[in-house]
Amino acid sequence: MVLSPRKLPKQGRARATCDAILEAAAHIIARSGLAAFNTNAVAERAGVSIGSLYQYFPNKDALMVALIQRQQQGQLDTLMAAAATIDPAADLATVVRALVRAAMQHHHTDDLLATAIDHEEARLPVDDLIGQYLDQGGMLVAALLANFQGQIGLVEPQVAARTLPALVRAVTDAWANLTPPQLDTAENEAVKAVLGYLR
Amino acid sequence: MVLSPRKLPKQGRARATCDAILEAAAHIIARSGLAAFNTNAVAERAGVSIGSLYQYFPNKDALMVALIQRQQQGQLDTLMAAAATIDPAADLATVVRALVRAAMQHHHTDDLLATAIDHEEARLPVDDLIGQYLDQGGMLVAALLANFQGQIGLVEPQVAARTLPALVRAVTDAWANLTPPQLDTAENEAVKAVLGYLR
DNA sequence: CGGCAGTATGAATAATTGCTCACATCGCCT
DNA sequence: AGGCGATGTGAGCAATTATTCATACTGCCG
């Protein structure tokens, strides 16, 4: 099955349509889960006709793949933004905290979307996509941690890129799902977990 | 919507039917993901008629809830079995390794099923169910770690029960999804992460 | 055996859903 | 202006799917 976009938008209008469709898809999954994710609902919420959706995405899975890609790009952007604000003289704990905060931002807000993407990533043939994403994220993290080689064990960039966000999410969920949610503690515990893992 | 079982099986035959249905549901999701999970397919794979399925489960979501319950029970059973084989004189690392191995057993084998359950747990009103499960698992883990109070930080049993499996899965996935999968390393890394978090 | 609750069946139905297509509109280019 | 590719439309089809129901079989108990 073809999973690449059917055609690329050439005019600004078309790009807006594509964005609206992806935005709608993300919103529906985040709000109501994979069970409510269907192409008609996405088109309606996006305010475009179902035909327009199929102008750009050859089928539902292709839309999902595009959504995965969009989410990955969002995570990379957040990560880069966080990295840009880090004081070059900061110590390891401070750097890790900044990374944890960036990761939490994307994971905790939309639990349903995050778990949905996990599941779809396992089902769809998107290994290449994930590999690229992990390479980029890994390089970024590796660059940030390069100053602390004495304090941390050997960690492959790709593995770090895969493990650290998962680690953060694991700990975050544990504390954020309590009643009431304890987000500050979540961050502290996630930092603890990452530092514990790195050393 | 009613999510509790419609009726309880009273004869052995009926219990076998229920089991076959749940087993089939688990198999389909583990093999083909949530997208392929539908009641007709489950009934067919279970070797029973669709009517029989609806004798015991009032709707699809109720079947999913029962599946979640079954999976939780399986995890508790595995955990208890692992706990039973632990040498009372073992050190912390050994105990953790045994727990990690137990957790890996359930998570890694069926990635699709595990991620599907994560997602459905976030969508369905099963907080009570999860609470019960975490209480039981937490008590078990807390009991196992009670001997090491000097070596570990304070960890609430409920939080430990939620964090530790997630931690294990996070690290496991990072290594097991490589090509080729490095399951031994996965176990070692997971142990490292858990110990890092606990201390 | 007779009877009754428990269990199993599967065709049928109503609703949903992925997707197509014939057509309309838009906007850039000459 | 006008023409042509790019974009947008939405009714509707074919397939899938959740669920029901009238009917039939099974096994326990007196």
Image: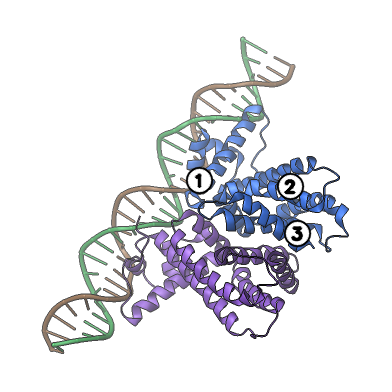
Chain colours: A blue, B purple, C brown, D green
| Mark 3: few/some/many CA within 10 Å (<14, 14-19, 20+) | some
Q: Kindly indicate whether the residues beneath marks 2 and 3 are on one polypeptide chain.
A: yes
* Residue A190 position in % (x across, y down): 68, 56
Sequence-wise first label, 2 or 1: 1
Of circles 1 and 3, the one toward us is 3
- Residue nearest the viewer, comparing B194 with A142: B194
**Is D25 placed left or right of A25 in the picture?**
left
Sequence-wise first label, 1 or 3: 1
Tag 1: amino acid: Arg
Quarter location, residue B80: bottom right
**Is B100 placed left or right of B116 in the picture?**
right
- Label 1 sits on a secondary structure element that is helix
Q: Which mark is residue A31?
A: 1
**Is B140 placed left or right of A138 in the picture?**
left
- Residue nearest the viewer, comparing B159 with A55: B159
Q: Chain of mark 1?
A: A
Q: CA distance from mark 1 to mark 3?
A: 33 Å
Quarter location, residue B110: bottom right
Q: Chain of mark 3?
A: A
* Residue A72 position in % (x across, y down): 68, 47
Q: Is residue B92 visible?
A: yes
Q: Which mark is residue A135?
A: none
Residue wearing tag 2: A98
Q: Kindly indicate whether the residues beneath marks 1 and 3 are on one polypeptide chain.
A: yes
Q: Residue at coordinates 57% horizontally, 43% vertically from top-left?
A: A26
Q: Are marks 2 and 1 in contact (CB under 8 Å)?
A: no
